[in-house]
Structures are given as structure tokens and as C-alpha cells.
Amino acid sequence: MHVPAEYLEDLCFDAQQAAEKAIKAVFICRGERFPYVHDLEELLQILERNGLKIPKYVWEAEELSRFAVVTRCPGMVGPVTKNDYRRAGRIATGVQAVRYKVMGKGVISPLSLR
């Protein structure tokens, strides 16, 4: 049996969680309530309805929602590739940058993922 050196599914789950926590931090910072869901598009839609301008690149976070359950329900999605992992990391970093900006902490530069 071949055991992979890294479980990209787990790393993509971590990227989804980082983006989700960042989005929910924006809700908290703005004094707004949020539903207990893992659907990042739904959370962003609520923020936008509440008057927050969501940058175009942050909407890519919806791609990460599939990773919210992938580690708990194996086989629900196809294999995760290194490209999937790199993209997930870039998206999560972009969402974090918006969180910092909204919370008045400045903007971080996106990480260069290899």
C-alpha cells in the first residue's frame, strides 16, 4: 500500500478553515451575526448585503467550501492535486488580507506558495 508523504486534502481543509475564520472575524469586527455554516459564498453574500464591498478575488473563496467536509467524508471529491493545494493557499491568503484591512490592521501581502 502506498502512503503519500503529504495529505493535500488536510492542507486544503486548513486553507478552507483559515478563510472561514477570517470571514467570520469580519462579521465579529462589524458587530454582525453570522450563520454557523461552512459555505463561504453564503457568508460573503451576507457581508455584501450588509454593505461590505467584497473584492472580486475574495469571491474565489467559494471554491474552498468543498474542502470543509473532504477530510470528514473521504471520497466525496476527487483527489486533491498540488495545484489545488497551491490555489487554496493563495485564496485563503487573499481572504486573510481582506480581514486585516477590514479590521484596521493593514494589509498583508499574499504568500508565495511553491
Image (cartoon, grey):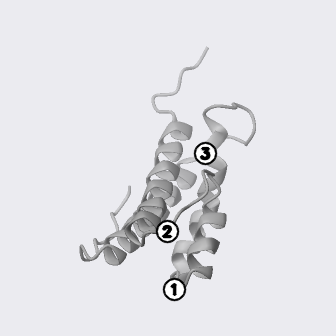
Question: Looking at the image, which residue is at 60% across and 65% down?
Answer: 43
Question: Looking at the image, which residue is at 38% across and 58% down?
Answer: 113
Precedes in sequence: disc 3 or disc 1: 1
Residue 30: quarter of image? bottom left
Determine which of the numbered discs, if any, sits on residue 32 in the image.
Answer: 2
Location of mark 3 (residue):
68
Please name the amino acid that badge 2 sits on. Answer: Glu
Measured in 3D between alpha carbons, the distance from the residue under mark 3 to the one under mark 2, in whole angstroms, is 23 Å
Residue mark closest to the camera, 1 vs 2 = 2
Measured in 3D between alpha carbons, the distance from the residue under mark 1 to the one under mark 2, in whole angstroms, is 15 Å
Q: Nearer the viewer, residue 67 or 48?
A: 48
Measured in 3D between alpha carbons, the distance from the residue under mark 3 to the one under mark 1, in whole angstroms, is 25 Å
Please name the amino acid that badge 1 sits on. Answer: Lys
Location of mark 1 (residue):
53
Q: Residues within 10 Å of mark 2 (few under 14, many from 20)?
A: few
Question: Looking at the image, which residue is at 49% across and 68% down?
Answer: 32
Q: Position of residue 110 (x, y in %)?
A: 34, 69
Above or below: residue 105 compared with residue 70: below
In this rendering, would 63 be left or right of 93? right
